[in-house]
């Protein structure tokens, strides 16, 4: 009989652009002493694929093709998508496969905070999973994005936010077969505009501590 591996605390943060997902994730990882995976996933995946990470940016969290959706259906359950003529591009399939591989390896080795990349679906069977969704109103996110990227106008920033939302929604739907904002996926949903990122960090941290306590039991340490 195979020995059951130790389970670790795994925090997966899904987020809309401008909601502060990376900010919250990095600070949580530092506070918890956990590994942090965001763009690091793309860089490591590129290294394993022997490709330039910058060249793979265009495929990161984009909608998957028909063949990819079919393939992912075996990993996440039956894909709820109709048949459509395939538009096969190997880069996005290979990239997501590698990112998935890295996430699973990281969760098996120690506590980790994962931002994006459908982590909440990839790692859904992890006993120590805490899945979080961070969001904020479009206007507030556009203002944040305009400042971060130094965009010329709020309208340009709003267009960027809306386009990003659509791409991420299509990506999540192609991977899971369900809606991106479905609350059934998440243990905790936080409006970072109404509550602020500092409060979001505290909420997620306290939730993580509860998950860790239940995971560890009376004698073991989970992280």
Image (tube, rainbow, N blue to C red):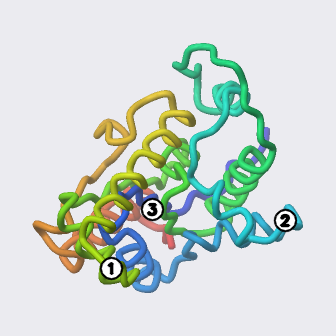
Q: CA distance from mark 3 to mark 2?
A: 24 Å
Q: CA distance from mark 2 to mark 1?
A: 37 Å
Label 2: how many residues lie within 10 Å, few (<14), some (14-19) or many (20+)? few
- The residue lying at 33 percent from left, 74 percent from top is 145
Q: Position of residue 95 (x, y in %)?
A: 73, 54
For discs 3 and 1, the disc positioned in front in the rendered view: 1
Q: Position of residue 102 (x, y in %)?
A: 71, 60
Is tag 2's residue or tag 1's residue first in the polypeptide sequence?
2
Q: CA distance from mark 3 to mark 1?
A: 35 Å
SS category of the residue bearing label 2: helix
Is tag 3's residue or tag 1's residue first in the polypeptide sequence?
3
SS category of the residue bearing label 1: loop
The residue singled out by tag 1 in the image is 152
**Circle on res. 48:** 2
For discs 2 and 1, the disc positioned in front in the rendered view: 1
Q: Is residue 145 above or below residue 172?
A: below
Front residue of 49/83: it is 83
191 horizontally vs 169: left or right: left
For discs 3 and 2, the disc positioned in front in the rendered view: 2
- The residue lying at 51 percent from left, 73 percent from top is 223
Rendering quarter of residue 82: top right
Rendering quarter of residue 206: bottom left
Q: Position of residue 187 (x, y in %)?
A: 31, 49
The residue singled out by tag 3 in the image is 11
């Amino acid at each position: 009989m195979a020995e059951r591996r130790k389970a670790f605390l795994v925090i997966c943060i899904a987020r809309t652009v401008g909601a502060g997902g990376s900010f919250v994730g990095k600070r949580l990882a530092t506070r918890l002493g956990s590994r942090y995976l965001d763009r690091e996933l793309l860089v490591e995946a590129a290294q394993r694929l022997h490709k330039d990470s910058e060249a793979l940016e265009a495929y990161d969290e984009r909608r998957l093709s028909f063949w990819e959706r079919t393939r992912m259906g075996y990993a996440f359950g039956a894909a709820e998508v109709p048949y459509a003529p395939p538009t096969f591009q190997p880069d996005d399939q290979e990239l997501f496969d590698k990112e998935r591989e890295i996430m699973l390896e990281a969760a098996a080795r120690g506590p980790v905070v994962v931002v994006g990349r459908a982590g909440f679906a990839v790692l859904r069977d992890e006993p120590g999973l805490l899945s979080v969704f961070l969001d904020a109103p479009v206007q507030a996110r556009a203002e944040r994005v305009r400042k971060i990227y130094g965009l010329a106008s709020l309208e340009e920033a709003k267009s960027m936010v809306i386009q990003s939302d659509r791409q991420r929604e299509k990506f999540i739907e192609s991977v899971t077969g369900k809606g991106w904002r479905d609350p059934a996926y998440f243990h905790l949903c936080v409006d970072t505009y109404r509550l602020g990122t500092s409060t979001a960090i505290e909420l997620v941290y306290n939730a993580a501590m509860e998950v860790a306590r239940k995971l560890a039991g009376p004698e073991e340490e989970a992280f």
